[in-house]
Image: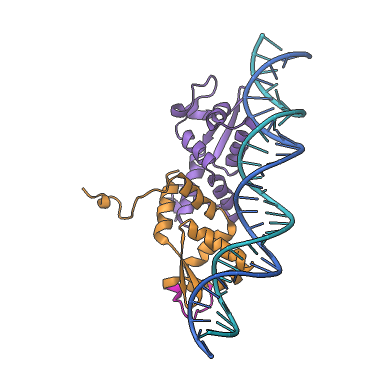
Chain colours: A purple, B orange, C blue, D cyan
Amino acid sequence: MSSVLFSPVDETELDAPDLERALKALASARRLQILEWLKDPQAHFPPQEHGDPVEHGACNMYITDKLGVSQPAASRHMKVLVDAGLVIATPRAGYVYYRRDSDAIARLTDQIAGL
Amino acid sequence: MSSVLFSPVDETELDAPDLERALKALASARRLQILEWLKDPQAHFPPQEHGDPVEHGACNMYITDKLGVSQPAASRHMKVLVDAGLVIATPRAGYVYYRRDSDAIARLTDQIAGL
DNA sequence: CGTGCAGATAGCGAGTTAGTTATATCTATA
DNA sequence: TATAGATATAACTAACTCGCTATCTGCACG
Protein backbone atom coordinates (compact mmCIF):
# COMPACT_ATOMS: atom_id res chain seq x y z
CA MET A 1 0.00 0.00 0.00
CA SER A 2 2.70 2.40 -0.98
CA SER A 3 1.74 6.02 -1.03
CA VAL A 4 4.25 6.52 -3.79
CA LEU A 5 1.42 5.79 -6.17
CA PHE A 6 -0.18 9.02 -5.10
CA SER A 7 2.86 11.12 -4.23
CA PRO A 8 5.89 10.82 -6.45
CA VAL A 9 7.53 13.59 -4.42
CA ASP A 10 8.26 13.44 -0.73
CA GLU A 11 5.20 14.73 1.07
CA THR A 12 6.93 15.79 4.24
CA GLU A 13 5.35 19.00 5.34
CA LEU A 14 7.20 21.80 7.07
CA ASP A 15 6.12 22.40 10.63
CA ALA A 16 4.70 25.79 11.54
CA PRO A 17 8.00 27.51 12.41
CA ASP A 18 9.73 26.22 9.28
CA LEU A 19 6.78 27.25 7.12
CA GLU A 20 6.84 30.70 8.66
CA ARG A 21 10.58 30.93 8.04
CA ALA A 22 10.16 29.93 4.41
CA LEU A 23 7.34 32.43 3.87
CA LYS A 24 9.39 35.20 5.47
CA ALA A 25 12.24 34.31 3.13
CA LEU A 26 9.89 34.66 0.16
CA ALA A 27 8.31 37.86 1.43
CA SER A 28 10.97 40.14 0.00
CA ALA A 29 11.10 41.66 -3.47
CA ARG A 30 14.88 41.31 -3.48
CA ARG A 31 14.83 37.61 -2.64
CA LEU A 32 12.02 36.88 -5.09
CA GLN A 33 14.17 38.54 -7.72
CA ILE A 34 17.17 36.39 -6.79
CA LEU A 35 15.09 33.21 -7.02
CA GLU A 36 13.86 34.32 -10.43
CA TRP A 37 17.41 34.94 -11.65
CA LEU A 38 18.48 31.53 -10.36
CA LYS A 39 15.90 29.83 -12.55
CA ASP A 40 18.32 30.46 -15.41
CA PRO A 41 21.76 31.54 -14.22
CA GLN A 42 23.22 31.48 -17.71
CA ALA A 43 20.64 33.98 -18.91
CA HIS A 44 21.12 36.38 -16.02
CA PHE A 45 24.78 36.27 -15.04
CA PRO A 46 28.13 36.59 -16.80
CA PRO A 47 30.10 33.49 -17.71
CA GLN A 48 31.93 31.94 -14.78
CA GLU A 49 35.42 30.55 -14.52
CA HIS A 50 35.13 27.65 -12.16
CA GLY A 51 31.55 26.73 -11.34
CA ASP A 52 29.17 25.39 -13.96
CA PRO A 53 26.21 27.78 -13.87
CA VAL A 54 23.72 25.02 -14.57
CA GLU A 55 25.07 22.56 -12.03
CA HIS A 56 26.19 24.82 -9.20
CA GLY A 57 24.33 28.04 -9.89
CA ALA A 58 25.49 31.61 -9.85
CA CYS A 59 28.53 33.08 -8.20
CA ASN A 60 27.74 35.22 -5.20
CA MET A 61 29.71 38.16 -6.57
CA TYR A 62 27.49 38.41 -9.61
CA ILE A 63 24.37 38.25 -7.49
CA THR A 64 25.76 41.07 -5.37
CA ASP A 65 26.50 43.19 -8.43
CA LYS A 66 23.12 42.58 -10.00
CA LEU A 67 21.24 43.32 -6.79
CA GLY A 68 23.03 46.62 -6.51
CA VAL A 69 23.56 46.35 -2.77
CA SER A 70 26.68 45.94 -0.69
CA GLN A 71 28.41 42.57 -0.46
CA PRO A 72 27.31 41.98 3.17
CA ALA A 73 23.69 42.80 2.31
CA ALA A 74 23.67 40.28 -0.52
CA SER A 75 25.43 37.75 1.68
CA ARG A 76 22.68 38.01 4.25
CA HIS A 77 19.90 37.66 1.68
CA MET A 78 21.54 34.47 0.48
CA LYS A 79 21.84 33.22 4.04
CA VAL A 80 18.11 33.79 4.58
CA LEU A 81 17.34 31.76 1.47
CA VAL A 82 19.74 28.97 2.45
CA ASP A 83 18.45 28.85 6.04
CA ALA A 84 14.90 28.61 4.70
CA GLY A 85 16.02 25.64 2.61
CA LEU A 86 15.18 27.26 -0.71
CA VAL A 87 18.71 27.61 -2.05
CA ILE A 88 21.82 25.43 -1.92
CA ALA A 89 25.30 26.92 -1.49
CA THR A 90 28.35 25.28 -3.04
CA PRO A 91 31.78 26.64 -2.09
CA ARG A 92 34.26 26.01 -4.88
CA ALA A 93 37.65 27.39 -5.73
CA GLY A 94 37.30 30.34 -3.39
CA TYR A 95 33.85 31.31 -4.59
CA VAL A 96 30.38 30.35 -3.39
CA TYR A 97 27.83 29.29 -5.96
CA TYR A 98 24.12 29.31 -5.28
CA ARG A 99 21.36 27.34 -6.95
CA ARG A 100 17.68 26.79 -6.28
CA ASP A 101 16.69 23.71 -4.32
CA SER A 102 13.96 22.85 -6.78
CA ASP A 103 12.58 19.93 -4.81
CA ALA A 104 12.33 21.95 -1.62
CA ILE A 105 10.68 24.82 -3.47
CA ALA A 106 8.20 22.42 -5.05
CA ARG A 107 7.36 20.89 -1.68
CA LEU A 108 6.92 24.34 -0.21
CA THR A 109 4.64 25.60 -2.96
CA ASP A 110 2.61 22.40 -2.70
CA GLN A 111 2.18 23.05 0.98
CA ILE A 112 1.26 26.68 0.37
CA ALA A 113 -1.36 25.48 -2.11
CA GLY A 114 -3.07 23.83 0.84
CA LEU A 115 -3.37 27.07 2.78
CA MET B 1 -10.90 32.50 -28.65
CA SER B 2 -11.77 32.65 -25.02
CA SER B 3 -9.05 31.68 -22.62
CA VAL B 4 -11.77 30.43 -20.31
CA LEU B 5 -11.25 27.06 -21.93
CA PHE B 6 -7.87 26.89 -20.31
CA SER B 7 -8.39 28.94 -17.20
CA PRO B 8 -11.69 28.64 -15.40
CA VAL B 9 -10.37 31.05 -12.78
CA ASP B 10 -9.18 34.55 -13.46
CA GLU B 11 -5.48 34.35 -14.23
CA THR B 12 -4.62 37.91 -13.34
CA GLU B 13 -1.28 37.85 -11.60
CA LEU B 14 -0.37 40.15 -8.77
CA ASP B 15 2.37 42.61 -9.59
CA ALA B 16 5.57 42.50 -7.56
CA PRO B 17 4.50 44.86 -4.75
CA ASP B 18 1.11 43.13 -4.33
CA LEU B 19 2.76 39.71 -4.32
CA GLU B 20 5.23 40.88 -1.71
CA ARG B 21 2.37 42.28 0.38
CA ALA B 22 0.47 39.00 0.18
CA LEU B 23 3.54 36.97 1.12
CA LYS B 24 4.24 39.26 4.06
CA ALA B 25 0.64 38.77 5.18
CA LEU B 26 1.15 34.99 5.06
CA ALA B 27 4.54 35.13 6.76
CA SER B 28 3.13 35.17 10.28
CA ALA B 29 2.25 32.20 12.46
CA ARG B 30 -0.67 34.14 13.91
CA ARG B 31 -2.17 34.98 10.54
CA LEU B 32 -1.62 31.47 9.19
CA GLN B 33 -3.52 30.24 12.22
CA ILE B 34 -6.38 32.66 11.55
CA LEU B 35 -6.63 31.54 7.93
CA GLU B 36 -6.71 27.94 9.08
CA TRP B 37 -9.52 28.65 11.56
CA LEU B 38 -11.47 30.46 8.85
CA LYS B 39 -11.49 27.35 6.71
CA ASP B 40 -14.22 26.08 9.01
CA PRO B 41 -15.58 28.81 11.29
CA GLN B 42 -18.27 26.56 12.72
CA ALA B 43 -15.67 24.10 13.92
CA HIS B 44 -13.44 26.71 15.53
CA PHE B 45 -15.68 29.44 16.92
CA PRO B 46 -18.73 29.61 19.17
CA PRO B 47 -22.19 29.95 17.63
CA GLN B 48 -22.97 33.47 16.50
CA GLU B 49 -26.10 35.53 16.90
CA HIS B 50 -26.31 37.55 13.73
CA GLY B 51 -23.84 36.48 11.09
CA ASP B 52 -24.01 33.10 9.43
CA PRO B 53 -20.57 31.55 10.06
CA VAL B 54 -20.53 29.83 6.70
CA GLU B 55 -21.65 32.80 4.66
CA HIS B 56 -19.99 35.70 6.46
CA GLY B 57 -17.30 34.01 8.50
CA ALA B 58 -16.25 34.46 12.07
CA CYS B 59 -16.94 37.37 14.36
CA ASN B 60 -13.87 39.46 15.13
CA MET B 61 -14.41 39.14 18.89
CA TYR B 62 -14.07 35.38 18.75
CA ILE B 63 -10.93 35.62 16.66
CA THR B 64 -9.50 38.03 19.22
CA ASP B 65 -10.31 35.69 22.10
CA LYS B 66 -8.89 32.65 20.37
CA LEU B 67 -5.69 34.43 19.38
CA GLY B 68 -5.15 35.45 22.97
CA VAL B 69 -3.99 38.96 22.11
CA SER B 70 -5.53 42.34 22.72
CA GLN B 71 -8.43 43.53 20.60
CA PRO B 72 -6.35 46.13 18.71
CA ALA B 73 -3.65 43.55 17.94
CA ALA B 74 -6.21 41.18 16.44
CA SER B 75 -7.82 44.06 14.59
CA ARG B 76 -4.53 44.90 12.94
CA HIS B 77 -3.83 41.31 11.95
CA MET B 78 -7.22 41.23 10.26
CA LYS B 79 -6.46 44.50 8.51
CA VAL B 80 -3.23 43.04 7.14
CA LEU B 81 -5.13 40.06 5.76
CA VAL B 82 -7.86 42.25 4.28
CA ASP B 83 -5.35 44.68 2.75
CA ALA B 84 -3.52 41.74 1.20
CA GLY B 85 -6.83 40.64 -0.34
CA LEU B 86 -6.89 37.28 1.42
CA VAL B 87 -9.87 37.91 3.68
CA ILE B 88 -13.20 39.72 3.25
CA ALA B 89 -14.74 41.78 6.04
CA THR B 90 -18.51 42.06 6.43
CA PRO B 91 -19.85 44.56 8.97
CA ARG B 92 -23.23 43.43 10.23
CA ALA B 93 -25.35 44.34 13.21
CA GLY B 94 -22.51 46.10 14.95
CA TYR B 95 -20.05 43.26 14.49
CA VAL B 96 -17.50 42.58 11.78
CA TYR B 97 -17.37 39.11 10.29
CA TYR B 98 -14.36 37.82 8.41
CA ARG B 99 -14.17 35.07 5.84
CA ARG B 100 -11.49 33.79 3.48
CA ASP B 101 -11.47 35.13 -0.06
CA SER B 102 -11.08 31.66 -1.50
CA ASP B 103 -10.70 32.80 -5.09
CA ALA B 104 -8.01 35.31 -4.22
CA ILE B 105 -6.18 32.74 -2.10
CA ALA B 106 -6.35 30.23 -4.94
CA ARG B 107 -4.99 32.77 -7.42
CA LEU B 108 -2.19 33.63 -5.02
CA THR B 109 -1.18 30.04 -4.36
CA ASP B 110 -1.26 29.38 -8.11
CA GLN B 111 1.09 32.28 -8.60
CA ILE B 112 3.37 31.12 -5.80
CA ALA B 113 3.50 27.70 -7.44
CA GLY B 114 5.26 29.42 -10.34
CA LEU B 115 8.03 30.87 -8.22
C1' DC C 1 54.17 29.99 3.83
C1' DG C 2 52.67 34.42 2.87
C1' DT C 3 49.57 37.31 0.27
C1' DG C 4 45.25 38.48 -1.74
C1' DC C 5 40.62 38.22 -2.55
C1' DA C 6 35.79 36.29 -1.62
C1' DG C 7 32.72 35.86 1.80
C1' DA C 8 31.10 36.16 6.62
C1' DT C 9 30.55 38.66 10.79
C1' DA C 10 30.22 42.79 13.82
C1' DG C 11 28.28 47.00 14.87
C1' DC C 12 25.49 50.92 13.86
C1' DG C 13 21.15 53.59 12.35
C1' DA C 14 16.65 54.04 10.10
C1' DG C 15 12.40 52.02 9.23
C1' DT C 16 8.91 48.39 10.17
C1' DT C 17 6.28 45.06 12.91
C1' DA C 18 3.77 43.56 16.75
C1' DG C 19 2.49 43.99 21.15
C1' DT C 20 0.45 47.02 24.82
C1' DT C 21 -3.10 50.76 26.97
C1' DA C 22 -5.96 54.64 26.14
C1' DT C 23 -9.20 56.80 23.37
C1' DA C 24 -12.04 57.77 19.43
C1' DT C 25 -15.66 56.25 16.21
C1' DC C 26 -19.63 54.20 14.80
C1' DT C 27 -23.81 51.60 14.86
C1' DA C 28 -27.82 49.41 16.97
C1' DT C 29 -31.23 49.81 19.88
C1' DA C 30 -33.59 51.06 24.36
C1' DT D 1 -31.54 60.57 20.78
C1' DA D 2 -28.59 58.84 24.35
C1' DT D 3 -26.12 55.02 25.55
C1' DA D 4 -23.60 50.82 25.27
C1' DG D 5 -20.78 47.83 23.12
C1' DA D 6 -17.76 46.46 19.09
C1' DT D 7 -14.10 47.98 16.30
C1' DA D 8 -10.61 51.27 14.71
C1' DT D 9 -7.06 54.49 15.61
C1' DA D 10 -3.35 56.79 18.34
C1' DA D 11 0.72 56.73 20.93
C1' DC D 12 4.30 54.28 22.94
C1' DT D 13 7.87 50.45 23.37
C1' DA D 14 10.57 46.37 22.26
C1' DA D 15 12.24 43.57 18.86
C1' DC D 16 13.38 42.65 14.21
C1' DT D 17 14.80 43.86 9.23
C1' DC D 18 17.77 45.77 6.07
C1' DG D 19 20.88 48.93 4.54
C1' DC D 20 25.68 50.62 5.38
C1' DT D 21 31.05 50.55 6.69
C1' DA D 22 34.68 48.24 8.90
C1' DT D 23 36.86 44.14 10.00
C1' DC D 24 37.67 39.23 10.42
C1' DT D 25 38.17 34.54 8.41
C1' DG D 26 39.66 31.34 5.38
C1' DC D 27 40.89 29.25 1.18
C1' DA D 28 43.92 29.28 -3.32
C1' DC D 29 47.73 29.86 -5.24
C1' DG D 30 52.17 32.22 -6.20
Q: Please state the horizontal and vertical placement of residue B97, each as a whole percent of the image.
A: 48, 71
Q: Residue at (46%, 76%) from the top-left corner?
A: B51
**Residue B115 found in image quarter:** top left
Position of B107 compared to A33: left or right? left
Q: Please state the horizontal and vertical placement of residue C19, each as a whole percent of the image.
A: 66, 62
**Residue B29 found in image quarter:** bottom right
Q: Which of B75/B102 is in front?
A: B75
Q: How many marks?
A: 0
State yes or no: residue A46 in magenta. Answer: no
Q: Residue at (56%, 36%) from the top-left corner?
A: A88
Q: Which of A21/B18 is in front?
A: B18
Q: Which of C10/A14 is in front?
A: C10
Residue A10 is at least partly visible in this image: no
Q: Residue at (62%, 30%) from the top-left corner?
A: A71
Q: Residue furthest left?
A: B1
Position of A40 compared to A30: left or right? left
State yes or no: residue B48 in magenta. Answer: yes
Position of A71 compared to B10: left or right? right
Residue B36 is at least partly visible in this image: yes
Q: Please state the horizontal and vertical placement of residue D12, each as a whole percent of the image.
A: 72, 58
Check the image and report above or below for A83 versus A17: above
Does the magenta stretch mainly form a helix, a strand or a loop? loop
- Which residues lie in the magenta part? B45-54
Q: Please state the horizontal and vertical placement of residue A108, each as a whole percent of the image.
A: 50, 48
Q: Quadrant of the N terminus of chain A?
A: bottom left
